[in-house]
Image: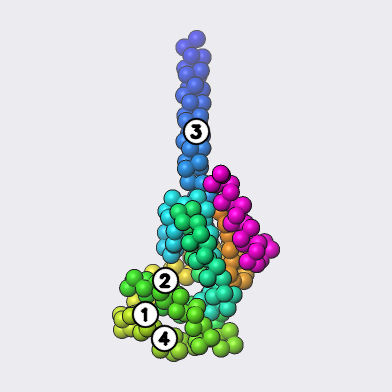
């Protein structure tokens, strides 16, 4: 009799724990949305540069190559999205430096981040891309000529860009890009959903659908 009571008590405790855990997980999912998904860390890493509100429910993740012409062309559109939906969209930038020499440009960007000049440097590189790329290859000497215009300390930048932590960032982003099937840039995801088919209109439609779902009314 005591044994049966013990077994029943254990079962009740296990069921109670399972129910409590499932409710906690449900509430966490409701609060965090996309970020509660198990594979969310593949899209958003602690080192990733971000723009937008931390509590935004729509995450726009882009795998970019600084030397990619299409990435540069999409940059103004991303800014428009953030300005049009303040507090609702968070932009996450990841790296997929597929062009020859692009990893060095990523190093420049990450070193510029240490001087709080990340987004200014990225905008500069996108705008002047034709000056420092030739036949899909990076001409790094041309990049160095442009950097003083955003007020960077070039001596410090040259030292910082060799930091092993930047190498780790590039390797992690490339590994995540591979895991997610990103073979071309830009590679866009909205709350984990890949942009298919590719284009400005499909991206606007995908963002619109997620905004309507997460911010009804």
Q: What element carries label 1?
A: helix
* Direction from residue 195 to residue 62 in the image, left or right: left
Per the rendering, the mark at residue 150 is 1
N-terminal of the two: label 3 or label 2? 3
Q: Quadrant of residue 73?
A: bottom right
In three-dimensional space, the C-alpha distance between marks 1 and 3, rounded to whole angstroms, equals 50 Å
Instruction: Depth check: give the residue in front, 157 or 87.
Output: 87
In three-dimensional space, the C-alpha distance between marks 1 and 2, rounded to whole angstroms, equals 10 Å
In three-dimensional space, the C-alpha distance between marks 1 and 4, rounded to whole angstroms, equals 8 Å
Q: What element carries label 4?
A: helix
- Residue on which the image places disc 4: 146
Image quarter (top left, top right, bottom left or bottom right) of the C terminus: top right
Seen in the picture, residue 175 relative to 130 is either above or below; the reply is above
Q: Do the residues labelled 4 and 2 touch (CB within 8 Å)?
A: no
Residue at 36% over, 84% down = 148
* Direction from residue 94 to residue 154 in the image, left or right: left
**Does residue 180 show up?**
no
- Residue on which the image places disc 2: 119
N-terminal of the two: label 1 or label 3? 3
Circle 4: is it few (<14), some (14-19), or many (20+) Cα within 10 Å?
some
Circle 1: is it few (<14), some (14-19), or many (20+) Cα within 10 Å?
some
């Amino acid at each position: 009799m005591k044994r049966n009571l013990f077994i029943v008590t254990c079962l009740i405790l296990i069921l109670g724990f399972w129910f409590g855990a499932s409710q906690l997980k449900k509430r966490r999912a409701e609060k965090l949305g996309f970020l509660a998904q198990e594979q969310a860390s593949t899209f958003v890493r602690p080192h990733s540069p971000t723009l937008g509100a931390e509590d935004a429910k729509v995450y726009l993740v882009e795998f970019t190559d600084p030397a990619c012409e299409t990435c540069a062309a999409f940059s103004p559109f991303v800014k428009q999205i953030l300005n049009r939906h303040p507090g609702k969209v968070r932009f996450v930038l990841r790296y997929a430096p597929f062009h020859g020499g692009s990893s060095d440009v990523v190093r420049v960007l990450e070193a510029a981040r240490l001087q709080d000049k990340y987004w200014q440097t990225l905008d500069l590189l996108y705008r002047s891309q034709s000056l420092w790329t030739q036949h899909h290859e990076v001409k790094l000497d041309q990049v160095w000529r442009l950097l003083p215009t955003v007020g960077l300390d070039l001596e410090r930048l040259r030292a910082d860009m060799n930091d092993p932590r930047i190498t780790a960032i590039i390797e992690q982003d490339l590994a995540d890009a591979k895991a997610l099937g990103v073979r071309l840039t830009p590679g866009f995801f909205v709350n984990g959903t890949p942009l298919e088919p590719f284009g400005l209109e499909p991206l606007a439609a995908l963002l619109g659908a997620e905004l309507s779902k997460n911010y009804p009314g």
